Image (cartoon, rainbow, N blue to C red):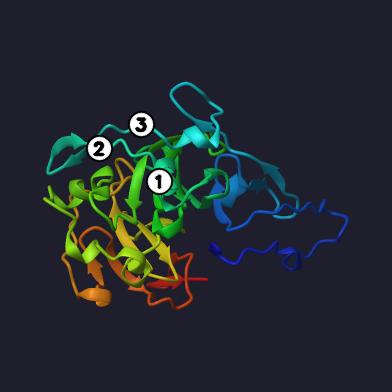
Amino acid sequence: MMKKYLFCLFSALFAVSATAYELKRVSVHDPSIVWDSSSKTYYIFGSHRAAAKTTDLMSWTAFTAPWKTATSNNAANNVAFETPAVKKVKKGGVDVDFPAFSATKWSAKGGSGYSVDGNMWAPDVIYNKMLKKWCMYLSINGNAWYSSIILLTADNIEGPYLYQGPVVIGGFKNGTEYKETDFELVLGPQSSLPERYATGGKWGDRYPNNIDPCVFYDEEGKLWMTYGSWSGGIWMIELDENTGLRDYDVTYELTGSGNGITVDPYFGKKIAGGYYVSGEASYIEYIGGYYFLFVT
């Protein structure tokens, strides 16, 4: 679950003497890099709440962005992702109920003794121009593919970050578990779990592990998220710039069958990988008229 961009400290790129800068290192696993133009500061956010900042790419200062809830500006991990702040979303031009999804309880379905403390993976932080907020897309990992990517927002890039709701959820492979997710909000009411999702322990043969988000604006101003890992591959869905969440008016027509599904009505479009071929931590950049996909 290695994340993003092969980050380095760039020290060899600076034609300055060694005494001109204080060299101060930090450790941030799975770093996502973002530039705050107002403070002229580089930030990196990584797994397990590791984060750091610098103005010169030489001297780094570690910090921890706090979690916000309705009752706290410094909430503990085990309560921070329990209750979404968003209660309604738009679909078809009308307000519809948004699921009260507990990301922590969902991931705990993957096995006994679960703790979220070591399972906050690979965040991606971006400034949403419509919301005028910093948006953190965070993987809440669970065993057996019970993972989700959630959205948190903050007025300040250093937090506190408030849980808004899930963006995409995986692992609903048994019984009526899908009813705890936004699955029916996407596909409409279901009398039972569609057979193609009843994969049991073979989920990763067909569908993504919902980790390692990359969120970006395309050249037309649309907001997208890629995600996934080496088992089920890298997938992409369109987001709603007005909420930062999934755009529930965008539909994806089922393409393929069995383990050869390349477009799924819930998970969106598969753009790379799968079949347990190494490749995760997607990152997309527009360069010289082309969109480039980078993976670890």
Q: Residue at x 78, y 65 (%)?
A: 15
**Label whose residue precedes the other's in the sequence (1 or 3):** 3
Kindly check if marks 1 and 2 are in contact, taking CB atoms under 8 A apart as contact: no
Please tell me which residue lies in front, 63 or 101.
101
Please tell me which residue lies in front, 252 or 202.
202
Locate residue 121 relative to residue 248 in the image: left or right.
right
Residue under label 2: 98
Disc 1, SS: strand
Disc 2, SS: loop
**Label whose residue precedes the other's in the sequence (3 or 2):** 3
Please tell me the numbered disc located at residue 248. Answer: none
Please provide percent x and percent y for residue 292: 42, 72
Amino acid type at image mark 2: Phe
Q: Residue at x 37, y 72 (%)?
A: 289
> Gap in Å between the C-alphas at discs 1 and 3?
12 Å
Amino acid type at image mark 1: Ile
Locate residue 61 relative to residue 119 in the image: left or right.
right
Number of residues whose C-alpha sits closer than 10 Å to that of mark 1, classed few (under 14), some (14–19) or many (20 or more): many
Disc 3, SS: loop
Please provide percent x and percent y for residue 240: 28, 47
Residue under label 1: 150
- Farthest residue toward the right? 19
**Label whose residue precedes the other's in the sequence (1 or 2):** 2
Residue under label 3: 85
Q: Which quadrant of the structure image shows residue 39? A: top right
> Gap in Å between the C-alphas at discs 3 and 2?
10 Å
- Farthest residue toward the top? 71
In this rendering, does residue 125 appear at all? yes
Q: Residue at x 53, y 44 (%)?
A: 115
Kindly check if marks 3 and 2 are in contact, taking CB atoms under 8 A apart as contact: no
Please provide percent x and percent y for residue 202: 34, 69
Q: Residue at x 38, y 74 (%)?
A: 274
